[in-house]
Image (cartoon, rainbow, N blue to C red):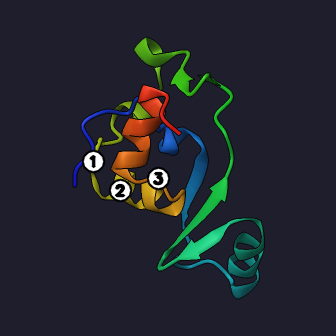
Amino acid sequence: MKPESCDACAACCKVLMLGITGMSGEDVQYFSTVGTVQGCMAVVPMRCKQLKDDKCSIYDTRPKKCHDFALGGPACIALRHALQLTLQETINSAAGIK
């Protein structure tokens, strides 16, 4: 199911996602120890310094990379999955339901 909002998620602001194609085995091994390697991507926990209370503090002037990140696109879904966020968990979090 495609998410309809970034509220209470901010998965894209909580991790660094790197393509590992062409990386040395040593680099891939490093990323697998500090994060997770899934297919051709490494997902490393790393919060954006502009993230305040799970909201972007510079949303109106955010970088192009952030602006172009498609809500519900393949990278969004992959990050939500990597952080084990389901749409229902996101909705519950936004509503304050545990």
Residue at 38 percent of width and 33 percent of height:
6
80 over 7 or under it: above or below: below
Determine whether the residue tagged by mark 3 lies in a helix, strand or loop: loop
Residue at 55 percent of width and 61 percent of height:
18
Instruction: Please tell me which of labels 1 and 2 falls first in the chain.
Output: 1
Residues at badges 3 and 2 in contact (C-beta under 8 Å)? no
| Residue count near mark 1 (Cα–Cα under 10 Å), binned few <14, some 14–19, many ≥20 | some
Alpha carbons under labels 3 and 2: distance apart: 9 Å
Q: Nearer the viewer, mark 3 or mark 2?
A: 3
Q: In x, y percent, where is residue 89?
A: 43, 46
Residue at 46 percent of width and 53 percent of height:
85
| Residue count near mark 2 (Cα–Cα under 10 Å), binned few <14, some 14–19, many ≥20 | many
Residues at badges 1 and 2 in contact (C-beta under 8 Å)? yes
Q: Is residue 21 left or right of residue 68?
A: right
Q: In x, y percent, where is residue 7?
A: 41, 29
Q: In terms of depth relative to the viewer, which is nearer, 23 or 90?
A: 90
Alpha carbons under labels 1 and 2: distance apart: 6 Å
Query: In terms of image quadrants, where is residue 43?
Result: bottom right
Q: Amino acid at mark 1?
A: Gly
Q: Amino acid at mark 2?
A: Ile
Determine whether the residue tagged by mark 1 lies in a helix, strand or loop: loop
Q: Is residue 7 left or right of residue 4?
A: right
Q: Amino acid at mark 3?
A: Leu
Alpha carbons under labels 1 and 3: distance apart: 13 Å
Q: Which residue is mark 2?
A: 77
Residue at 51 percent of width and 59 percent of height:
84
Query: In terms of image quadrants, where is residue 65?
Result: top left
The reply to whether residue 8 is in sight is no
Q: In terms of depth relative to the viewer, which is nearer, 64 or 97?
A: 97
Q: Which residue is mark 3?
A: 85
Q: Which residue is mark 1?
A: 72
Q: Nearer the viewer, mark 1 or mark 3?
A: 3
